[in-house]
Structures are given as C-alpha cells and as structure tokens.
Image (tube, rainbow, N blue to C red):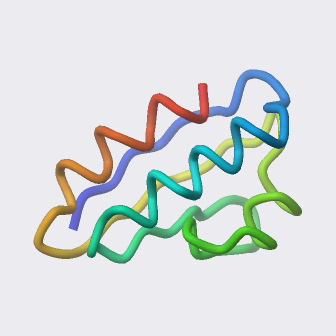
Amino acid sequence: MRVKEMKIIKNLPVDSLIKFIETANTFESDIRIKGGNFTIDAKSIIGVLTLVRAGLEVTLITQGDDEEEALKAISHLLL
C-alpha cells in the first residue's frame, strides 16, 4: 500500500477531473481518496466530481500490483 497526503490547491475543471478518473482506471490497483469524513473510489466519476475541490486536504491511497506507478501517475493531476 502506498499513501500520499496532499492539498488540492485549485478547483479543477471537469475535463481535468475526467482525465484524473480515466488515468486512475488504467491501473489495476485499488485507488482511494480520503478526506475529512469520506473515502471515495478514485475511479468513480460521481465521487470525484462531487467531492474533489480546492482547499481540500486529501490522502491518496493505492493498493495493488501497480500501486507505485498509480500513485505517481495520479497525484500530480490533482495539483
């Protein structure tokens, strides 16, 4: 399992969030976004579009065979 804490600095446009989701879906690993009192599947369009916003402090959690690559690929897309 890999974990990275980060703060989303700016509101991302919908097309950037969709790119994030599409990138997450290219990996076999389980990818979660944890923040405040919620944990969402990073591969879920409804979860990501509803909850990811500027100023939010989140923890990205990846678990699986390609967890390291997944974390590297998706973490910069939220900045």
Residue depicted at 36% across the width and 62% down the height? 26
Q: Is residue 12 left or right of residue 41?
A: right
Q: Is residue 50 above or below residue 46?
A: above
Depth order, front residue of 61/74: 74
Could you say where residue 72 lies in the image, as x and y percent from the top left?
A: 29, 39
Q: Is residue 23 above or below residue 34?
A: above
Depth order, front residue of 14/4: 14
| Residue 57 figure quarter | top right
Q: Is residue 13 left or right of residue 60?
A: right
Could you say where residue 8 lies in the image, as x and y percent from the top left?
A: 69, 32
Quarter of the image for the N terminus: give it. bottom left
Could you say where residue 56 lies in the image, as x and y percent from the top left?
A: 76, 42
Residue depicted at 27% across the width and 75% down the height? 28
Residue depicted at 76% across the width and 39% down the height? 15
Quarter of the image for the C terminus: give it. top right
Q: Is residue 37 above or below residue 24?
A: below
Q: Is residue 37 left or right of residue 35?
A: right
Residue depicted at 60% across the width and 35% down the height? 78
For the image shown, how many numbered marks are present on the structure? 0
Could you say where residue 18 lies in the image, as x and y percent from the top left?
A: 69, 50
| Residue 75 figure quarter | top left
Of all residues, the one furthest to the left in this rendering is 65
